[in-house]
Image: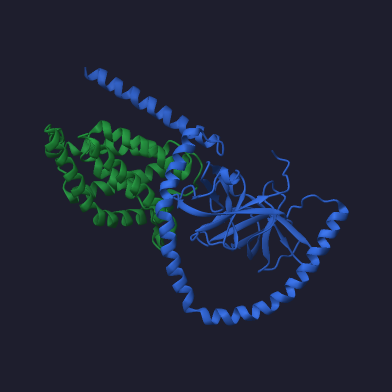
Amino acid sequence: MNQFFTNKKLIVLLVSVILFVSLVSFSMRNTGNIPFIQQATNDITAVLGRIYSKPANAIIGVFDSIDDLQDTYEENQRLKIEIDRIYERQAELNTLKDENDRLEEELDLQQSLTDYRTISGTVISRNPDNWVDQIVVDRGSQDGVEVGMPVMSGNGLIGRISETNPTSSKVVLLTNIEQTSNQVSSEIVMEDETVYGIISDHNVETNQLLMSQITSTIEISEGELVQTSGLGGSIPRGLVIGEVEEVSMDSHGLAQQVYVKPSADFNNIRYVTIIHRLAESGEE
Amino acid sequence: MANWKKTTIPIFLLFFTLLIDGGLSYLFREQLNTSFGLMIPRLVIITLIMLSFYLEPKQLFILASAFGFIYDSYYSGVLGIYIAAFILIPYLVIQIRQLINPYFYAIMLINIVILTLLELFVFGVYRMIGLSDMTLQLFLVSRLSGTLLFNTVAFAIIGYPLKEWIKVLMSMEEKKSGSGRNNKVSIR
């Protein structure tokens, strides 16, 4: 009898380990194209999650606005000065836009890499264990969200859509270590030339993104703006990623790498903008 | 009809704490990311451990696998890790509850042990499948300490009302059905 029990336990253990390993590998393989039952579970949970995330957001919004109120005067002075400058820039921008439109018409360009549509959404929850740094937002495939679309929050790029359900979707953040999820083709537009590179890593301690594979001959100064280049599939050109904070050579001494201070605050994401590029990527 | 509270209230408790975990970690991310490590809210695990001391094994395993699936599917998208973890927790607790009485402080200590095991298990799996490149030392310092601290404090706050609520629920059930099956495991 005792023998029988140990055998039975062993078989149960073996079967469950096999099931466990196959489940993990199965679900890691097909990201983005998830089975119906999982979609249904995610959506039902997301609907219930919204019940408390809405009031919580509202309450925190009140606290935020009290915080804002405290330094309103200084901010107002600063903004007034900035507005004066913006008027000039607006006029310049209008003429440039007009000119650009006419030139595009002449060249018969349909869609450029900078054209995009936005879908705005609210964050419902975030993965508590931060091994896979993901957030859940309340927009899904019914709103036109597709896997691979870039997501902005505040001033900068934060990640891309990794999974869509009918009414909710998951955003995988740039802070992840998984290479396929966080590589973004980026560029630094300087006065005389443009530098291309790839955002490929994130340092948790210093909160810096690493932009690598940059030609070693170009001199890059600190404080330059890093933005997406639009060359990597579904991300349009001109989304801000951050600022250059530190320039160095990589470990082999063959290419330069740039440490980028991200414009988005990865610790405080409450509202997101999902970007839908209008130009075809030619990938699908 | 007699059983409806016994089935729905554990489901409600687990679901509620699961959502709270996600909510806490996005609303208070800055506060949770302290100097002595990142705190991971694990209220759903606390609830599961507490329920494991009182519910029947069959119901526990069904609940655990269902909520493990929800946790995996909703938060990370990598199925299997939390399903396994959630099923192992009641299994462990059922072994333990045959040996000791469910005193508050005893549960608190068991809670710490199980949370440590769980964190190590999840870390090990993520390390194996290549979604993390953290070393064990860094993990112990930057994740485990903060998480244990947060959840022990959380347990001290929500543990007692939770325990009393579940106890009231179970005793109510016994009076109605008159079977008293649950007493057998908890008092021995």
| B110 lies left or right of A83 | left
Outermost residue to the front? B1
Which residue lies at the image location 48% right of the left edge and 76% below the top edge? A69
Residue A78 picture location, percent across and down = 60, 80
Relative height, residue A224 to residue B118 (above, below): below
Identify the hue of chain A.
Answer: blue
Q: Which quadrant of the rendered structure holds the N terminus of chain B?
A: top left
Which residue lies at the image location 34% right of the left edge and 48% below the top edge? B16
Relative height, residue A98 to residue A236 (above, below): below
Which residue lies at the image location 19% right of the left edge and 51% below the top edge? B105
Identify the hue of chain B.
Answer: green
Q: Quadrant of residue B122?
A: top left
Is residue B81 something one can see in this rendering? yes
| A1 lies left or right of A168 | left
Q: Quadrant of residue B145?
A: bottom left
Residue A34 picture location, percent across and down = 53, 35
Residue B180 picture location, percent across and down = 12, 34
Q: Which quadrant of the rendered structure holds the C terminus of chain B?
A: top left
